[in-house]
Image (cartoon, helix red, strand yellow):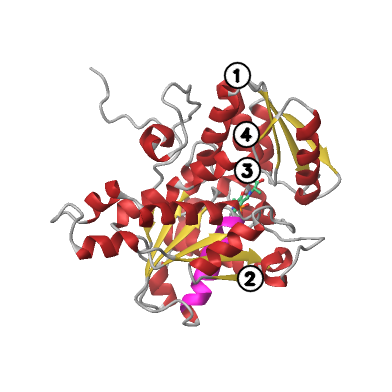
Amino acid sequence: MPFRHRYTGLIERYRDRLPIADDTRIISLGEGNTPLIRLNNLPTVLDCDVDLYVKFEGLNPTGSFKDRGMTMAVTDAVNKGSRALICASTGNTSASAAAYAARAGIAAFVLIPDGKIAQGKLAQARIHGATVIQIKGNFDAGMRLVREVGEVAPVSIVNSINPYRLQGQKTAAFEIIEELGSAPDYHCLPVGNAGNITAHWIGYCECAGVGDATLTEACAFCGGQCRFAQALVQKRPRMLGYQATGSAPFLRGEPVSEPDTVATAIRIGDPQSWAAAQAARQESDGWFAEVSDDEILAAQRTLAETEGIFCEPASAASVAGAMRDVRNGRIALGSRVVCTLTGHGLKDPDVAIAQAERPVLDVPPEKEAVRRAILDNLPS
Ligand code: F0G
């Protein structure tokens, strides 16, 4: 018997809202359909009345939101006859490109900043068989090279300057609206190259503008005809983009030449989607703000310790920003807030281990020693 409800990826799911022809061969690893988790404990920690959710994009096939865009970009590249992909990356794009290239049976070339990507991401690019090209330079230098090489070598660029990437990534907004019944009041994202905040805004705007399917789902009583349903669907969130203090070109108002942060995924000084991200902020009446590395790491730890959710440092920037802006009242009390957790914590074990507060206990392999260790460490 066929599996009638087998989920087969976001292109199949949202085909009618994506630029995909009917006869296209789809390259998918079952990406999308990630959980929107309501935080039960963090609002108590904050002592604030806020309806807080995280969209855990770390549960995509390669552990980051990049897979949403990559299924689209690689599907397009393969159908145009491309035999090789190229990208510059702080790690996640390279992991995703490598995996989808392997799935498609084509080659991947990934440019990474020497020594500045998390081990898990490097492991992914390598095990999937990508050619890893390491440069003595940061992501921005790699991005410039990729643009130049794309003109003179037989490769498809799969960075988010490829419009298919944003088309895939916009589907995260569709999923959120479907689950909540309307857009949240605020949507918080970490911002690096600024593709993802742009893609989310595209998704929300599409739902607000057309969205017949969503209308029907929004109001169970009238099938989307009443004014209540219209208002629900036309609602769009205020887009909040958070950057790490050492890599915050949107806060400086210009590119940053030597970006630096513990959140290596967003160690980017010259975002490619600058204008589009500014438009998203402006049109949505949102804001950009910066969070320090200490705030990022504290948020990562709090989420892990109080909610059981392990995201990578860059992802925690959205929660760090939301926590601060809830506390200082910039995010209105009683609001519904969604934070995107862009990547899984397992990507970057070194940072997690370095900041773990509880020591690993060395004990002899004896019952009494283990009993002692338990009694000494039970919560009071
Ligand atoms: N969070 C994570 C975990 C990322 O890997 C990235 C970007 C971002 C946030 C920022 O998203 O660039 O759309 O604003 N990583 C890219 C990469 C640059 O190469 O993996 P953005």
Q: Does the magenta portion include 360?
A: no
CB at disc 3 and ligand 1 closer than 8 Å? yes
Between disc 4 and disc 1, whose residue precedes? 4
- The residue that appears at 35% across and 32% down in the rendered structure is 7
| Disc 4 and disc 1 in contact, CB within 8 angstroms | no
How far apart marks 4 and 1 lie (CA) works out to 12 Å
Task: Judge left or right: residue 135 versus residue 156.
Answer: right
How far apart marks 2 and 4 lie (CA) works out to 29 Å
Between disc 1 and disc 2, whose residue precedes? 1
**Residue 296 has which mark?**
none
**Residue 105 has which mark?**
1
**Residue numbers of the magenta segment:** 313-326
**Residue 290 has which mark?**
2
- The residue that appears at 46% across and 82% down in the rendered structure is 329
- Indicate whether 33 appears above or below 131: below
Q: For mark 4, what is the residue? A: 97
**Residue 206 image position (x, y, % from top left):** 41, 52
Mark 3 Cα-neighbour bin, 10 Å: few <14, some 14–19, many ≥20: many
How far apart marks 2 and 3 lie (CA) works out to 22 Å
Q: Is the magenta stretch mostly helix, strand or loop?
A: helix
**Residue 92 has which mark?**
3
Residue 356 at least partly seen: no
**Looking at this view, is 155 or 380 the one in front?**
155
